[in-house]
Image (tube, grey):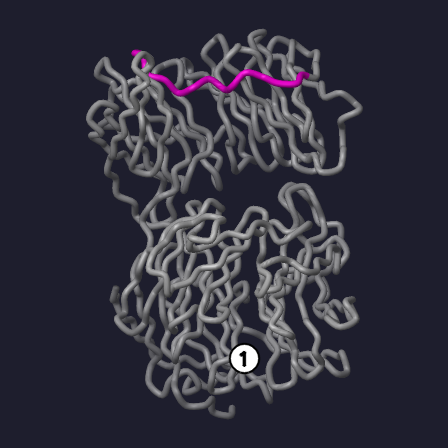
Amino acid sequence: MAGRVIRFGQMLWAGFGICLSALNSVPAPFESLGIPVRKGGLMGCVVGPNGRGGEALYFNFNQAKAPLFLVQVDPDTGQARQYQAPQGPGAWAFIVGPDERIYLGTWESGWLLRFDPRQPERGIEVLGKPAASETYLWQFDIDKDGKLYACTYPNAKLVRFDPTTGQMEDLGRMHPTEMYARSLVVGPNGKVYVGIGTTKGDLVAYDPATQQHRSILPDGLKGAKGWSTVGVSRRSDGNVYAEFGPNLMRVDDEAVTAVRSAPERPPLKLRDGREVVAHGRGTFALKDRQSGRVMERKFEYAGAGDMIFVLGEGPRGCVYGSTAMPLEVFRFDPRPGRSEHLGGMPGGEVYSMLEHDQKLYLCYYGGAVMNLYDPEKNFWKFGSVADCNPISFGGVGDGHLRPRAMIRGPGGSIYIGSEPPYGELGGAMAVWDPKLNKTVENYRHLVTNQSIVSLAYEPKTGLIFGGSSISGGGGTRPAEKEAKLFAFDPEKKKKVFEAALAPGAARYPATLAADGRVFTTAGDKLFVVDPLAMKLVQTVSLPGGQVDISLGLHPSGRLVGLTSKGVYTVNPSTAKITGFAASPVRVSCGFALVDDAVYFASGAELWRCRLATTNDATP
């Protein structure tokens, strides 16, 4: 999939002493390789009025290249009409209002959107922001007066909207410290029940009559290890139920009773009783209540492009990538210059990938699930049995949720560094045996209360070096003030070095060992460490903030890295930046070095910057 080529004249960064001939003796070419995946992420399906007296299925899609879109589908024919939102990348909250209009609550912006099937020409309208401080509207429910309630992030608030008057209300925090108000239900008594997380799960009841709220979770359940979020739902008997870890509870007014089981959630049904038993991106299935017959149908829609989350080098000299929500895997082959959409997996996005014996390991969020893809098998069939490709081996271990770093270490072992689960501090490093395809060692809290976000193997010392992040799992606040560079001895099976190289640095997102040195980054700085002396020997300013896991060794011997602004090269023996080429687009993620080009992404678009075949000139 060839794209446009953009050439830039030489630029001198006086502050860095940059010689652009390091990248190319002629102006550096940046080439767009197009948009590899346009599937869109399906966030939900509801049954609602079609605006003409009948019913329709509404499918809610997120995407990165353009705002979210809504697809209205005729359940009898599969005929579809698509409506683009003016803003908002996606929406978790999704409901049919009491006024027979469709409501969506966005993420990243916290906007309330509305679509009126009786006036489709108006499209999706932006109604406003119910709470100025909130960026996510997670879930909706409706009270007996026809008012919409939504729960929020990052301040665990409850908000309300009156479709009749258009009034929006910020009802305040439902918990004094937690960030996630993740689920809610309006009970038969009119009270609103909110599930809270992710550090200390809680169940809150809000009374619209008194405008007061209070925790109703039994004291014996609060703060139990591993229980970070309460989930609430309305079941088919009309009652409210709450789940917290292994506990299932029925909620009656403000009394909470433990129960062994609960009815199922109400099914998605049409007026004539047909049940929506399955729905996907372009498909749905309806089951007839009387005959039990299931009718499957397809519908068409057009996605603008899905966000590329990570890139890596794979077998056959190809570039592999994963999109985020949906997790779709694609491959770009530089020889024919063509992208191929391979297929999807059930996670949110691949966080790290690594070639091994002409196969590709892919580790995805959530749970740091490890998978192995064999390109020699010309099919994509995700699963956990032998005839699947990729084959899934499950999670890599305790403390792993977002597996940000994956490298090859001594003895052929694979090392994986991760951010921890929601509500927890202290990530982990796992040692994966590719012969057994399982974790053989796992180290939690290598850096106290910090995540592991970059790794490198230094062969002269035999040590694994890693960079940490002060951030923890979702919903936590950092407990430490500075990120660390650390060294781990695989033989002694313990950490042997730790230091804060940059005062106040929050993370070291890219680390590399080359030429007998260890290079790591924080913000717009490159740090050079002598691994024998365990000493910082040099600090270099970068032309922009370093992109995660985007620092590599070119066959010429130079280092190549990405900042959000472009591509830079470094002479490892002098640790001086020898070249920089400004990108025509913002660099959102990387990273793959294949042949004489560096590959990166900008949103949903794949890009390539060709490098010179000669060694860097000495500044």
Badge 1 element: loop
Horizontal and vertical percent for residue 245? 68, 31
Query: For this rendering, which residue is in front, 144 or 579?
Result: 144
Looking at the image, residue 513 lies above or below residue 510: below
Q: Quadrant of residue 414?
A: bottom right
Looking at the image, residue 81 lies above or below residue 305: above
Residue at image point 50% right, 73% down: 561
Residue at image point 48% right, 49% down: 385
Residue at image point 25% right, 34% down: 298
Q: Main secondary structure of the magenta part?
A: loop
Residue type (three-letter) at the residue carrying disc 1: Gly
Looking at the image, residue 241 lies above or below residue 37: above
Q: Is residue 384 visible?
A: yes
Q: Quadrant of the N terminus?
A: bottom left
Q: Is residue 506 visible?
A: no
Query: For this rendering, which residue is in front, 441 or 406?
Result: 441
Q: Residues within 10 Å of mark 1 (few under 14, many from 20)?
A: few
Q: Is residue 270 magenta?
A: yes
Query: For this rendering, which residue is in front, 411 or 367?
Result: 411
Horizontal and vertical percent for residue 582? 41, 72
- The extreme bottom residue here reads 618
- The extreme front residue here reads 386
Horizontal and vertical percent for residue 222? 76, 28
Quickly name the residue at label 1: 15
Query: For this rendering, which residue is in front, 91 or 21?
Result: 91
Residue extent of the magenta highlight: 259-272
Q: Is residue 8 magenta?
A: no
